[in-house]
Image (cartoon, rainbow, N blue to C red):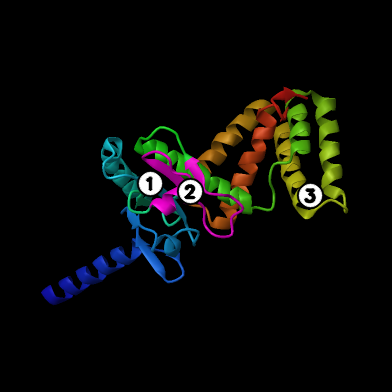
Amino acid sequence: FSRIYWLLLAISLKCKAEDLLVATKKGSTATLGQVLKLDADSFADHVAGDISIFVKFYAPWCGHCKRIAPVWMEFAQKLVEEPSLKHKVLAAEVNADENTALAKEYGVTGYPTFVFFPPKGSSQRPMHYGGPQKVEDFVRFAGSRTTALFLDRGKASRVFALDVLAWRFAQGGGDAREDMMRRVREVRDRDSAPGSMRASAEMYLKLMEKSIKAEDPGKFLEEEKERLDRLIRSGQLTDEKLSEVTARRSILDGFLHETLLPGGVPL
């Protein structure tokens, strides 16, 4: 009995250890829940690979860097607990004193500096983070960037012209709403329109159709926003479904907030 027990325990521990390994790039792996230490030689082996890497550039003599170190470690551990971030984002750090060229390349001028690196194939660029530095703040930022990545990859997305129609739909009465729906339907059915535009119009139109069936269209849009936010945070969606849901969630903002021209000028 004891041999079987120890064998099963060993198998269980092995499975747990493997579950914490993530492939960052072809031929390279890292351990979830730990801060990945990078330098000039290993940086390219992990960054711009299969997952996002959130990097802290620090200096050993920096007092604030020393204070933030346990927070960054807790953030790395928290990523494992968040279903929507596990296997998608990894926390890392670079000693900028020992890797000055690398720090300079990414615009590091003070310490600590936090830079979020998206995975390969993304149209996004590395983004500096300059917000609050509590664990929940880092988690929130990582979640927002991950959501943006899925939206970036989706076929449907927000369109300025359709946002204008969506806002007028949300603010208008019966006849105005019907007119906005007709215009969106024309975009969807236009053969000459790009496929992404038609896919976006279809998503705007579905939200319009569902809202007018509701007793209170405005309340429906707000509740739909909250529902989609919960779905995104749940971590239970497939990548394909998450892409669709994040696109719909983003498009909802076109109904809930007035679209402004460049410079914040109302239409």
The answer to whether residue 26 is visible is yes
Q: Secondary structure beneath disc 2?
A: loop
Q: Does 62 sit left or right of 89 as displayed?
A: left
Q: CA distance from mark 1 to mark 3?
A: 43 Å
Q: CA distance from mark 3 to mark 2?
A: 38 Å
Quarter holding residue 184: top right
- What residue appears at the point 40 percent right and 68 percent down from the top-left corner? 28
The quarter in which the C terminus is drawn is top right
The answer to whether residue 82 is visible is no
Crowdedness near tag 1: few (<14), some (14–19) or many (≥20) residues, C-alpha within 10 Å:
many
**Is 7 inside the magenta-drawn segment?**
no
Range shown magenta: 100-128
Please state which of residues 216 and 10 is positioned toward the viewer in this rendering.
10
Of mark 2 and mark 1, the one earlier in the sequence is: 1
- What residue appears at the point 61 percent right and 53 percent down from the top-left corner? 123
**Figure check: 249 above or below 263:** below
**Figure check: 214 above or below 45:** above
Disc number for residue 57 = 1
Of mark 3 and mark 2, the one earlier in the sequence is: 2
Disc number for residue 106 = 2
Residue type pointed to by label 2: Tyr
Residue type pointed to by label 1: Phe
The quarter in which the N terminus is drawn is bottom left
Residue 49 location (% of width, % of height): 49, 62
Residue 16 location (% of width, % of height): 29, 63
